[in-house]
Amino acid sequence: MADSLGNLAIALATSSRLAEAQFLAEEEIALVRQHIEEDPEALKPRLARALTNTSRLHQRAQQWEAALTMLDEAVDLQQPAADAGMIESQLSVISQVLDQYGERPEVTYRAYEIVRRLGSRQEGPLERQLSDVLTTLGVELMNHGRLDEALTTTQRTLEIQHRLSAAEPFYKLAITGTLSILTTVTSALGRWPEALAYAQEAVARHRELEQMMSPAPYPGFPQALANLSLVLTILERWSEALDTTDEAIVAFEEPTLHGVETSSQHTLRDLHERRDYILEHLQPNG
């Protein structure tokens, strides 16, 4: 009976009859719950799948709270060796919810807790999808001021991207963006030595990518230079800060060299002001 309800719910959802599909999916969940004590080992994974399928319906209906509630329970129920198809569905729902409602702190926090539990189990085939979700989560957590969680989430993203980049060149560029996020987060936390290491690596990787390209249109390089300029200035490494700031100004003023359609006037103004500040500290020594 539960199988029939689930299959019919999927068929209705395919026909865009979401309300009817949700009703039947909820009926399937209720039916499995009634019998779960009879064979928990067999029925808990079954309930996890029904909850996952229903969460997709809620997400499509833009009911983010219900979607995440279903996923939360599903992740608790499923075994660490849950099949890839179900986990892929769960990550897809989280990705869609974040795209729609990630600006809401409560959405980001709930998604983070689910992915934290789910993501620790995932290696291999699902890492691409997990990397995308973690990237979005890291940015949203940073935007909402949850800096410690943003740091651990983005560090996890970086680990995955390093593995993926061995076979897929795209992730070499993705790594530069992740390093820039890590620079911003560690700077906001006042962890300046770590910020410097991330900023230096981001710039170094951009230079490597540019050497591989002819011409070199990789975006993100001007901002990576600006990030490094700020960290060097905070650490009072004045000569390095001046050289990096000058290079960043040129990069922003000639954006077509780096695949950027328009320069950021706000960042340029900050860079020029920073350059004057650096010169004030260099002059007594010069």
Image: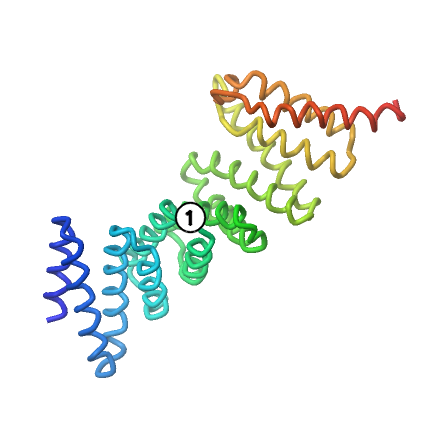
Instruction: Pick the quarter of the image with the C terminus.
Output: top right
Report the label total. 1
Identity of the residue drawn at 20% across and 73% down: 30
Most foreground residue, 13 or 125: 13
| Residue drawn where x is 32% and y is 68% of the image | 78
Above or below, 267 relative to 25: above
Q: Quadrant of residue 31?
A: bottom left
Q: Is residue 277 left or right of residue 107?
A: right
Residue depicted at x 12% and y 65%: 5
Q: Position of residue 41 (x, y in %)?
A: 27, 77
Is 61 on the left-hand or right-hand side of 253? left
Using residue 129 as the reference point, say whether residue 193 is left or right of it. right
For this rendering, which residue is in front, 38 or 61?
61
Is 101 placed left or right of 50 in the picture? right
Q: Secondary structure at mark 1?
A: loop
Q: Which residue is mark 1?
A: 102
Quarter residue 68 falls in? bottom left
In this view, 193 is above or below 106: above
Residue 198, above or below 75:
above
Kind of residue at disc 1: Gly
Where is residue 174 shown, x and y percent of the image? 47, 37
The residue at the point 83 percent across, 26 percent down is: 282
Please provide percent x and percent y for residue 141.
51, 50
Colour convention: rainbow
Depth check: 58 or 281 in front?
A: 58
The x, y position of residue 62, in whole percent, is: 29, 51
